[in-house]
Image: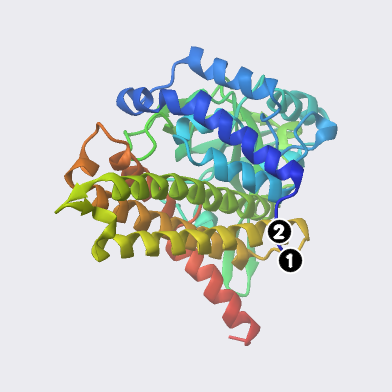
Amino acid sequence: MHFALTHEQNMLVDTVRAFVENELYPHEDAVDRLDEISPELAREIQAKALEIGLYAANMPEALGGGGLDNFGVTLMERELGRASYGLQMLVARPSNILRACTGSQVEEYLLPTIRGERHDCLAMTEPNAGSDVRGMQTRAVRDGGDYVINGSKHFISHADVADYVVLFAATDVEQTKAGPKKKITGFLVDMDQPGVTRRRGPSCVSHRGYHQCELFFDNCRVPVAHRLGEEGQGFDLMGEWLGATRLTVAATSVGRGRRVLEMAAQWAATRQQFGQAIGRFQGTGFKLADMATELEAAELLTLQAAWKCDQKRMTDSDAAMAKLFATEALGRITDQALQIFGGMGLMSSLPIERFWRDARVERIWDGTSEIQRHIISRAMLRELGA
């Protein structure tokens, strides 16, 4: 196993880096200030991403996607992660869970999403069921050729711009040795379906311009043909998806950490105090050393997990370790960078305070740090029979 990039992979990195710097960076300050991305700008960025082949790069080439393997997608995510989240998510990587589409779902949902004609979001989290997915209260009851769905979801990212939602709801209860557990099923639900209400959620300190929403389902009828996968198999579908999203969060955290470190090192090399660059003082220099070391470790963990994924060897622990370490390293890196910048780091005239704010959510969404530690330790103990 080695991570020396091929010529094609280096070209991918250079292409994405140039796109991020030329097409996304110029809009970051305005997006953070306004907490909005205009539809016109969104369409412009999407069109440019489609033109150079970056859109839906994680989807199979046979379906019109970019056909990148997991390692290539991770490299791309790393570079996109350098930019504001709301902007970089316009270079859409549709949820891998859509590969479960069959029959008419392919033409109605999957292919239009790959072409940029439709946009998806994913709804699992509920007010009383965050990390406890089995505790979700949204119900889908079979009624002839439909399912009738009632319940609510919250913290649903970019649902305000989505045309449809990949929704998970409880459809049954099974008895297990550990007690009753809800059986979960996935559905494809159009936002304009009767019985669906969408509402912007509270403003968030992290990732302005990338909004989270609340969704409400009131006797919403969804055809059986829009069920994603088999009834009761939604938990398995979610498991497949979560590994990919945890790698995404790890990779984008590494990319953002790299940008922050570069800015901190430049500041430390040019900011003069007591007749010399502040980076020459041990208190600052050692911070840079720790930041660089943590970033290298986070990147290696993330690339290793991506490589294992392509070899069909990635475990839940591999993805959890990458997400856990990369997000917590990003938190420490942004905090140390702010300390190096001093009072200026807290001023909105520089992006450091934005990086600091944005870093906080990474340890929460797509599985908290505590959940990642639980996954890792549980796997270790299971091998020992505990």
- Sequence-first tag of 2 and 1: 1
Q: Toward the viewer: 382 or 341?
A: 341
Badge 1 marks a residue whose secondary structure is: loop
Q: Is residue 71 left or right of residue 17?
A: right
- As drawn, the label of residue 14 is none
Whether 34 is drawn above or below 384: the answer is: above
Residue found farthest to the left: 274
Cβ–Cβ under 8 Å for marks 2 and 1: yes
Q: Is residue 148 visible?
A: no
Could you say which is closer to the camera, residue 185 or residue 373? 373
Q: Which residue is mark 1?
A: 1
Between the residue at mark 2 and the residue at mark 1, the CA separation in whole angstroms equals 8 Å
Left or right: 74, with 217 as reference point: right
Q: Tell me which amino acid carries mark 1.
A: Met
Residue 205 sits in which quadrant? Answer: top left
Residue sitting at x 57%, y 48%: 248
At label 2, counting other C-alpha atoms closer than 10 Å, the crowd grade (few under 14, some 14-19, many 20 or more) is many
The quadrant holding residue 270 is: top left
Residue at left 14%, top 54%?
274
Q: In this figure, which residue is indicated by the disc labeled 2?
A: 307
Q: Where in the figure is residue 263, as x and y percent of width and height?
A: 37, 44
| Quadrant of the rendering where the N terminus is positioned | bottom right
Amino acid type of the residue that numbered disc 2 sits on in the rendered structure: Trp
Horizontal side of residue 234 vs 286, given as left or right:
right
Percent x, y of residue 317: 60, 67
Vertical relation: 207 (above or below) 118: below
- Which residue occupies the foreground of this view, 129 or 8? 8
